[in-house]
Image: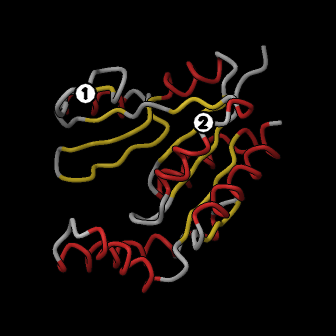
């Protein structure tokens, strides 16, 4: 059985990354499996350990860091960690499937460095920062302060785009999905 490859997709918040991944994962010919992240946050609603996330205590997560059991991680808020377990990536790859990683920009860069040619990294960009701001405002889910903070973070993250193998501008969703899909086809098939 051929071992799977890694597809890293990163983007600033509001660029359509989750929507693009949702469309691409439906393509059976790509043989994709979504990597389940680990987190120290408590389960919400109907979330199940090992299905939605691997729910770890802060102590367990720190032990995983100390034991070099993560391919990437970030402390998003004090005591609130998110990361990707090596055993999760290995589990999917060893099953012959290709792993799709929906991770932050720094995590994407780190995973690409670790896996090299076994991974492809794709950065989803907004057409412009102004368009991103408009998208976030149209969601009507954040305060103007939160939107300003997210736009500022996006500008910072966009500065790392050149470190990714591919950059896709999500101006028209269908085209961005098609471009992303073609990159993955060329990489895995």
- Residue at point 42% right, 77% down? 132
Mark-to-mark CA distance, 2 and 1:
22 Å
- Residue 117 percent across, percent down from the top left: 76, 43
Marks 2,1: beta carbons within 8 A:
no
The reply, left or right, for residue 148 in relation to residue 128 is left
In the image, residue 135 lies at what x, y percent?
Answer: 38, 74
Q: Residue at x 34, y 32 (%)?
A: 38
Q: Label 1: which residue?
A: 47
Residue for badge 2:
26
Q: Residue 108: where, in percent of width, then height?
A: 53, 52
- Quadrant for the N terminus, please: top right
Dot 2 crowding, Cα within 10 Å, few <14, some 14–19, many 20+: few
2 or 1: tag closer to the N-terminus: 2
Callout 1: helix, strand or loop?
loop
Nearer to us in this view, 49 or 45: 45
Image vertical order of residue 117 relative to residue 162, above or below: above
Locate residue 162 relative to residue 150 in the image: left or right.
right
Residue 124 appears in which quarter of the rendering?
bottom right
Residue pictured at 63% horizontal, 65% vertical: 163
Q: Nearer the viewer, mark 2 or mark 1?
A: 2
* Quadrant assignment, res 27: top right
Left or right side of 120 for 74: left
Q: Which residue is at 44% across, 28% downward?
A: 69
In which quadrant is the C terminus drawn?
top right
* Image: 99 above or below 167: above
Q: Describe residue 107's horizontal placement relative to residue 1 as left or right.
A: left
Label disc, if present, on residue 174 of the rendered structure: none
In the image, 53 versus 136, the foreground residue is 136
């Amino acid at each position: 059985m051929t071992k799977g490859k890694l597809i890293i997709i990163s983007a600033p918040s509001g660029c359509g990354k989750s929507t693009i991944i949702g469309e691409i994962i439906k393509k059976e010919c790509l043989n994709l499996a979504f990597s389940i992240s680990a987190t120290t946050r408590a389960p919400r609603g109907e979330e199940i350990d090992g299905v939605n996330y691997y729910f770890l205590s802060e102590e367990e997560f720190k032990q995983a860091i100390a034991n070099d059991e993560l391919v990437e991680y970030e402390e998003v808020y004090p005591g609130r960690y998110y990361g990707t377990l090596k055993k999760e990536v290995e589990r999917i790859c060893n099953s012959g499937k290709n792993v799709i990683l929906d991770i932050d920009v720094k995590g994407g860069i780190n995973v690409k460095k670790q896996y090299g040619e076994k991974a492809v990294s794709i950065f989803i960009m907004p057409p412009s920062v102004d368009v991103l701001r408009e998208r976030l405002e149209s969601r009507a889910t954040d305060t103007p302060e939160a939107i300003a903070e997210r736009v500022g973070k996006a500008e910072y993250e966009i500065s790392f785009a050149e470190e990714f193998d591919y950059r896709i501008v999500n101006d028209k969703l269908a085209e961005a999905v098609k471009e992303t899909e073609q990159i993955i086809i060329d990489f895995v098939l």
